[in-house]
Amino acid sequence: MMLERSEFAGAELRLSPNIDERVGGPADMLVLHYTGMDVADEALDWLCTERSKVSAHYFVYEDGRIVQMVPEHKRAWHAGVSSWQGQQQDLNSRSIGIEIANPGHQGDYPDFPPEQIAAVIELCRKCVERWAIVPRRVVAHSDIAPQRKEDPGEKFPWQSLFESGIGHWVEPSTATGGRFLQRGDQGQPVEALQAMLATYGYGVEITGSFDEVLEANIRAFQRHFRPARVDGVADVSTIETLHRLLSALPESQ
Ligand SMILES: [Zn+2]
């Protein structure tokens, strides 16, 4: 079935060839990206070019214009090798992907303009309602692929989305001092940290070693939930924010 108009009122339609069928059920997850290219139109072209082998359901320009590239019931190709809440394969089959135009960390990583964020919020609201996506499953690409990806990054206003009813968020802890954990540390406190991250959804194994995988996951957690400092060190405020987040999780999720 070809779409004749976008499923999101007011959006333009420009279909990407990079689609196929979902496997295993409908979408129950929303993954947010930045394009990581200097020019938005070039990023959109790329997502609609067969040889790129990438796509997403929606694209949001800096000025808030929205383009739909893939019908929501089809599978877009945006997640790559990734993991969330124990699912380690084919997150594309279970997700809606939204690409947000921004040059990203490889460029000058400008702030996301308010018009763009307003459009992202409206679009996410529709997707979350239509597919009944629970808050914990509205994630950054970096949350599900922390060793490969850093988008949409620490400038992305997760708090604004949360205040509009989208995603999960808590006020970050500002605690300082005290004991922290970092690369090279071993033992029970590291295990406890890994268990908390895994319980939330991050793809970490409980090994008791603070290795590069854990460091990448801490960095991803910080980008999303404690963006004041993204350094991969599990300091007191990072750990306390993670505690708060787990405590705030509705049992039904
Ligand atoms: Zn991405």
Image: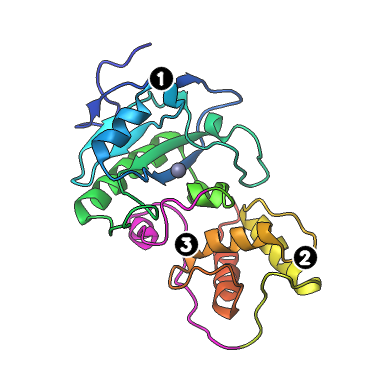
Q: What span is in magenta?
A: 149-177
Q: Which residue is mark 3?
A: 223
Q: Identity of the amino acid at label 3?
A: Arg
Q: Cα distance, mark 1 to mark 3?
A: 32 Å
Q: Horizontal and vertical percent for residue 188?
A: 80, 72
Which secondary structure, mark 1?
helix
Q: Identity of the amino acid at label 1?
A: Glu
Q: Which residue is mark 1?
A: 50
The foreground one among 113 and 211 is 211
Among the two numbered marks 3 and 2 on one chain, the one whose residue lies closer to the N terminus: 2
Q: Horizontal and vertical percent for residue 32?
A: 42, 45
Among the two numbered marks 1 and 3 on one chain, the one whose residue lies closer to the N terminus: 1
Q: Is residue 49 above or below residue 217?
A: above
Q: Cα distance, mark 3 to mark 2?
A: 22 Å
Image quadrant of ligand 1? top left
> For the point 39% across and 58% down, which residue is it?
158
Q: Residues within 10 Å of mark 3 (few under 14, many from 20)?
A: many
> For the point 24% across and 35% down, which residue is it?
41
Between circles 1 and 3, the one closer to the viewer is: 1
- Going by the image, does 153 lie left or right of 188? left
> For the point 24% across and 20% down, which residue is it?
5
- Going by the image, does 158 lie left or right of 253? left
Question: Residue 209 got which mark?
Answer: 2
